[in-house]
Image (cartoon, grey):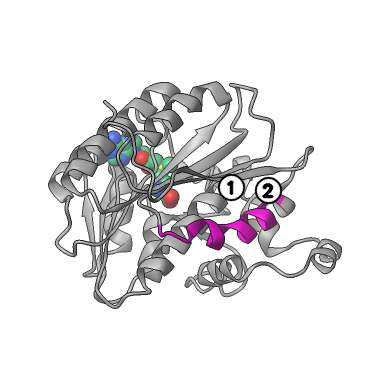
């Protein structure tokens, strides 16, 4: 089924985690001059109007990105300013044409990446929904660095890996409409992708409802064969209800060695600013650490 439309969720607490981690990864790739490739398997439409009917109906961004842009003044004084990574990330969002007079547009992963990329870097965007694809094509029609594919992102990976640049990042951000099945699709895609391109960085977003639904995936990651696997999670509710999105995580395979240090303060700040009725919690753990010989390849 193709029911999922990201417009309802754009800029929510899960996007804040997803896209600030994406930003950190692109910044890390820019530390070297050699070009990199970005592959976005589930790209969405690329940009979301926060005053659209869809976004307005749920208003999820109000408890997401808006909390970072307009933190309660007192809280800011007590706890200090936002960490530089989050400030720079917010700056790029506010620098988007259309946001001159405040936050009107929320850029999705393709547009955030295109903003952060250099002239020599490239992006491959896959999307299955025809309307989202035509919006992507329109958005990037003048950007020679960006290539839009109307394809199943999992299958496209076979053709797109390894990229000619030989360095870069694959973002896997599926809708998880059939919650547990999608984890299995991600595992199968990663297994194939790691065979074709063992050194690529892979960032996978995952929802957290019931903790038990996530555990098999995390165990699979521990044996996937990647050299380093970092898990970054942010929960705004306890992870014990299957009925709502309680939190989300990013799993980063072949992560930069110091990514945990880069993300620690931002996660602390996100938890402080995004708390709802309970204090938000976060977790930053190496599922696989350098030097450890990962177990046999998972199936
Ligand atoms: N990555 C985007 C971002 O961060 O702005 C949001 C992506 S949204 C969570 C998931 C998207 O995947 C939806 O637009 C949906 O139409 C698309 N989709 C679903 N199944 C797909 C598949 N097999 N291949 C490519 N796209 C798919």
Which quadrant of the render holds ligand 1?
A: top left
In the depicted structure, whether residue 174 falls above or below residue 32: above
Q: Is residue 151 visible?
A: no
Element type where label 2 sits in the image: helix
- Which residue is disc 1 drawn over? 12
Question: Is residue 114 shown in magenta?
Answer: no
Q: Which residues are magenta?
A: 256-271
Q: Quadrant of residue 141?
A: bottom left
Residue shown at 23% from the left, 54% from the top? 148
In the depicted structure, whether residue 165 falls above or below residue 156: below
| Image side of residue 192 versus residue 53, left or right | left
| Image side of residue 205 versus residue 145, left or right | right
Label 1 environment density (alpha carbons within 10 Å; few <14, some 14–19, many ≥20): many
Question: Is residue 265 shown in magenta?
Answer: yes
Q: Quadrant of residue 173?
A: top left
Quarter of the image for the C terminus: give it: top left
Q: In terms of depth relative to the viewer, which is nearer, 285 or 188?
A: 285
Marks 2/1: CA–CA distance: 6 Å
Contact (Cβ within 8 Å) of mark 2 with mark 1: yes
The dominant secondary structure in magenta is helix
- Residue 63, label in figure: 2
Image position, residue 38 (x, y; %): 29, 59
């Amino acid at each position: 089924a193709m029911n999922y439309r990201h417009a309802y969720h754009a800029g929510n607490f899960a996007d804040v985690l997803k896209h600030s981690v994406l930003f950190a990864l692109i910044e890390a790739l820019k530390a070297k001059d050699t070009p990199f490739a970005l592959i976005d398997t589930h790209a969405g439409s690329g940009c979301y109007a926060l005053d659209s009917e869809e976004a307005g109906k749920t208003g999820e961004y109000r408890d997401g990105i808006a909390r970072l842009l307009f933190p309660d003044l007192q809280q800011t004084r007590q706890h200090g300013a936002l960490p530089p990574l989050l400030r720079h990330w917010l700056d790029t969002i506010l620098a988007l044409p259309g946001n001159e007079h405040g936050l009107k547009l929320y850029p999705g992963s393709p547009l955030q990446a295109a903003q952060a990329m250099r002239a020599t870097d490239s992006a491959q965007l896959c999307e299955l929904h025809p309307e989202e694809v035509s919006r992507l094509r329109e958005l990037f029609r003048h950007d020679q660095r960006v290539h839009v594919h109307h394809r199943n992102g999992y299958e496209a990976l076979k053709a797109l890996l390894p990229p000619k640049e030989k360095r870069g990042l694959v973002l896997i951000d599926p809708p998880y409409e059939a919650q547990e099945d999608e984890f299995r699709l991600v595992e199968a895609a990663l297994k194939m992708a790691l065979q074709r391109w063992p050194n690529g960085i892979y960032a996978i977003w995952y929802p957290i409802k019931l903790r038990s639904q996530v555990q098999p995936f995390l165990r699979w990651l521990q044996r996937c064969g990647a050299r380093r696997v970092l898990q970054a999670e942010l929960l705004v509710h306890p992870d014990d209800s299957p009925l709502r999105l309680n939190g989300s995580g990013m799993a980063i395979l072949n992560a930069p060695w110091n990514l945990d240090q880069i993300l620690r303060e931002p996660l602390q700040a996100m938890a402080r600013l995004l708390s709802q009725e309970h204090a938000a919690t976060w977790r930053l753990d190496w599922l696989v650490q350098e030097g450890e010989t990962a177990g046999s390849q998972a199936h």
